[in-house]
Each structure stands twice: as C-alpha cells, then as structure tokens.
Amino acid sequence: QVQLVESGGGLVQAGGSLRLSCAASGPTFSSYTMGWFRPAPGKEREFVATISWRGGTIRYASSVKSRFTISRDNAKNTVALQMNSLRPEDTAVYYCAARRQGVTSTPSEYDYWGQGTRVTVSS
C-alpha cells in the first residue's frame, strides 16, 4: 500500500513557476512508476507527466512538454513536478499517482492516488 500526499500548489501569475511535490509512504516507493495528472474538460483525469522507477523513462503531455519537468528522489520517497512558463489553462488540481508496472499515460492504470494540490494561474 502506498499513500501519496501532494504539496506546493498555489496562486501564480501567468509566466511564473511552481514546484509541486508528492511525498510517498511505504518501503517500496522506488519500485513504482509515478505520474502527475489533472482534470480536463470531458476527462476525469488528463495525463501530465510520468517517470519510471529509476527515472530512466520520462514522458510528457504535448501541452506541457518543454515547460514542465518531472523528477524523483527515491532516497526521500518524493516525486516533483517543476512547472515553468505557467499559463491560465494550466489551472487545475494536480494529482500524484503510482503504479507497479511501467510508464503509462492512462490514469485508470494507476493504482494509488493522492488528494491533489490546487494550482491557479492568473492572467
């Protein structure tokens, strides 16, 4: 069982930056693929980014590629999402998720979810 707690959300002006963090409990964090998701019109959860258990495989949604960076620190049981050049359309609650298998952008294939952290980008 993995428990996930997100932090780092807040209010920022367009063009600004935020760094989200997800802290995981459990001794096997380093064996999990981690992902970030957010709600989107017509979708319950929209893929943002994912990182494999060793960090060797990383994928981004096209809408955030070159602006967002996902990283992980297995020694600290954390995964981060650095968000730069934020846009009003990035406004959402961001959720951290974990799964035992390899990277995927499909939210239903993740086993564990955090409660989310809200990001608001003003224009």
Image (cartoon, rainbow, N blue to C red):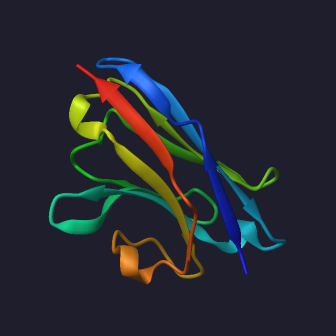
Residue displayed at 84% across by 71% down = 27
Q: Is residue 66 left or right of residue 74?
A: left
Q: Is residue 9 left or right of residue 14?
A: right
| Quadrant in the picture for the N terminus | bottom right
In this rendered view, identify the residue nearer to me: 57 or 51.
51
Quadrant in the rendering for residue 101: bottom right
Q: Is residue 113 left or right of residue 84?
A: right
Q: Looking at the picture, how far across and down is residue 41, in whole percent?
A: 16, 58
Total marks placed: 0
Residue displayed at 34% across by 32% down = 67
Q: Is residue 92 left or right of residue 29?
A: left
Q: Looking at the picture, how far across and down is residue 39, in whole percent?
A: 31, 58
Q: Looking at the picture, how far across and down is residue 9, in whole percent?
A: 52, 36
Q: Does the image show residue 15?
A: yes
- Classify 32 as above or below 76: below
- Classify 90 as above or below 53: above
Q: Looking at the picture, how far across and down is residue 55, in whole percent?
A: 58, 56
In this rendered view, identify the residue nearer to me: 64 or 86.
86
Residue displayed at 24% across by 30% down = 88
- Classify 90 as above or below 99: above
Q: Does the image show residue 51?
A: no
